[in-house]
Image: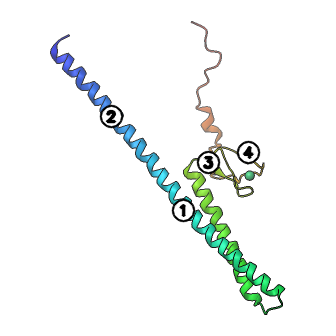
Amino acid sequence: MKTDDILAKVKATATQAGQAAVKAADKAAKTAERLVETTKLQYQIYELKGEIDGLYKEVGKLMHAAHRNKPVEDSKLDEMLSEIDRKLEALDELQERKARSKNRKYCRACGNSSEPEAVYCGHCGAPFEAEEKTEVNTDPTEAETEPKTEGTQASE
Ligand SMILES: [Zn+2]
């Protein structure tokens, strides 16, 4: 082997290694990005849960006041209960986003997560809403272009 050839080979190997390193770094950066996203969502979930707990406490106080025959504004109670509904809805959305950031599917029925391709929850069996079904191409003309390789192994 000539020196030039050896140099060329070393150069090529170095380039390949460099590209592999770039790819690995890119993957690591993406993983880190996802981790940051998951952590951020986890924090928002934590905060929201705290707010909901606070509202539950307020509602509890009102109920106790009513029990003690103290005047309780119905409108205030309704407002709080509606606020809890809204926050619970937002909490579900955050949980879904967090699950997605971990490539999982969140079940609103039981709060557990399943594989991304799951049709039913693996924990409680609740059906997942079909999402992005429009992406599936059911055009029959498309299927015909698929090469059929079965039964063509005559010569070996
Ligand atoms: Zn479930």
Rounded to the nearest angstrom, the CA distance separating label 4 from label 3 is 12 Å
At 69% from the left edge and 44% from the top edge, which residue is drawn?
118
Tell which residue pokes out farthest to the left in this image.
Answer: 3
Q: Label 4 to label 1, Cα distance in Å?
A: 26 Å
Q: CA distance from mark 1 to mark 3?
A: 18 Å
Q: Residues within 10 Å of mark 2 (few under 14, many from 20)?
A: few
49 versus 101 height, above or below? below
Residue, disc 2: 19
Judge from the rendering whether residue 30 lies leftward or rightward of residue 51; answer left or right: left
Which one is closest to the eye, mark 2 or mark 4? 4
Q: Residue furthest bottom?
A: 71
Q: Residue at x 77, y 88 (%)?
A: 74
Query: Is 67 displayed left or right of 27 in the figure?
Result: right
Q: Is mark 4 within 8 Å of ligand 1?
A: yes
Checking the image for residue 122, the label placed there is: 4
Secondary-structure class at tag 2: helix
Residue 43: assigned label:
1
Residue that numbered label 3 is attached to: 104
Tell me which label, 4 or 1, sits earlier in the chain. Answer: 1
Quarter of the image for residue 115 reads: top right
Name which of mark 1 and mark 3 comes first in the sequence. 1
Query: Mark 4 or mark 3, which has the lower sequence index?
Result: 3
Count of marks, rendered view: 4
Q: Residues within 10 Å of mark 4 (few under 14, many from 20)?
A: some
Structural distance between the alpha carbons of marks 2 and 4: 40 Å
State the quadrant of the C terminus.
top right
- Disc 3 is placed on an element classified as loop
The residue sitting at the top extreme is 156
